[in-house]
Image: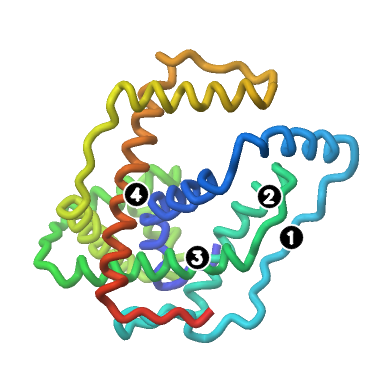
Amino acid sequence: MTLNKKWLLGLMLAAFVALLAACGEDEGASDDNNEETETTQEEQTEGEQPEAPEPDLENIPDVVAEVNGEKITKEDFETTYQGQFQQMAMQSQMTGTELDQDQLKKDVADNLVGQELLVQEAESRDYEVSDKEVDQMLTDLAEQNQMESKDKFLEELGNQGMKEDEVLSQVRAQLKVDKLLEEEVSVEAPTDDEVKAEYDKAVEQQESAETEQEIPAYEDVKDQIKQNLQTQKQSEETQKLVDKLREEGDVTVNL
């Protein structure tokens, strides 16, 4: 994996970015797509799998965007784009739908702008970050990446070109963003009715697709649905904060 100066921070902010992208896809999708997707998958099974697309990185400007004077470089953009492209390309092959790279480029640029706005706002406030908090986040990241310790995690990042002081700086920045979101983003927990409605919607969609996949019992998945809804609400409120910061700031996107 090629790393750039914002790679680690981008990794830790990826959850909210990915969810926002997923929400956009859900809004654009409809139940009518289920039947079309099923047919497409059957056709692919009978024939050859479609050739995997290649990322289109031609004509990317040296400065993709400027956020209150801070530049988002071509290197920053390309590293993030390639990671997002790989995920979307796999999804595109599975569903048989064409990947819109122009839209993906816009989404990636907007996400990088959003990340930068959050970091700048967090840095402008008097948040204190302790060494203990930094150590805990490094330990958590090591576990998420299936490494035995934070030292091994730092060593691996060093092998990939990131100096320890750079990593620690980005971890502190992320912890400040966490404090910013904790202060500015407040949502109520999903109600039982909301959770049940989401489950019923998923069951209806699966039944209309006429797949043989077994539908799990409500009691088995209600906690996961509740967590997903909570994350979605938090992400929607985070996006509102990003939109507010963008409106108040000086942002130029050159794509």
* Residue 211, above or below 143: above
Q: Residue at x 82, y 50 (%)?
A: 50
Name which of mark 2 and mark 4 comes first in the sequence.
2
Asked whether 192 or 157 is in front, the reply is 192
User: Alpha-carbon distance for marks 1 and 3?
Assistant: 18 Å
* Residue 17, above or below 249: above
Q: Amino acid at mark 4?
A: Ser
Q: Amino acid at mark 2?
A: Ser
Badge 2 element: helix
> What mark, if any, has residue 92 been given in the picture?
2
- Contact between marks 2 and 3 (CB within 8 A): the answer is no
Name which of mark 1 and mark 3 comes first in the sequence.
1
Q: Residue at x 36, y 24 (%)?
A: 223
Q: Judge the density around disc 2: few (<14), some (14-19), many (≥20) Cα neighbours within 10 Å.
A: some
What is the x, y in percent for residue 87?
Answer: 59, 52
Q: Does residue 206 appear left or right of residue 220 in this picture?
A: right
Residue at the extreme right: 47
Name which of mark 1 and mark 2 comes first in the sequence.
1
Q: Amino acid at mark 1?
A: Pro
The residue carrying mark 1 is: 53
The residue carrying mark 3 is: 108
Name which of mark 1 and mark 4 comes first in the sequence.
1
Badge 1 element: loop
Q: Amino acid at mark 3?
A: Val
Q: Does residue 244 appear left or right of residue 109 in this picture?
A: left
The residue carrying mark 4 is: 235
Q: Residue at x 20, y 46 (%)?
A: 186
Q: Does residue 77 appear left or right of residue 151 in this picture?
A: right
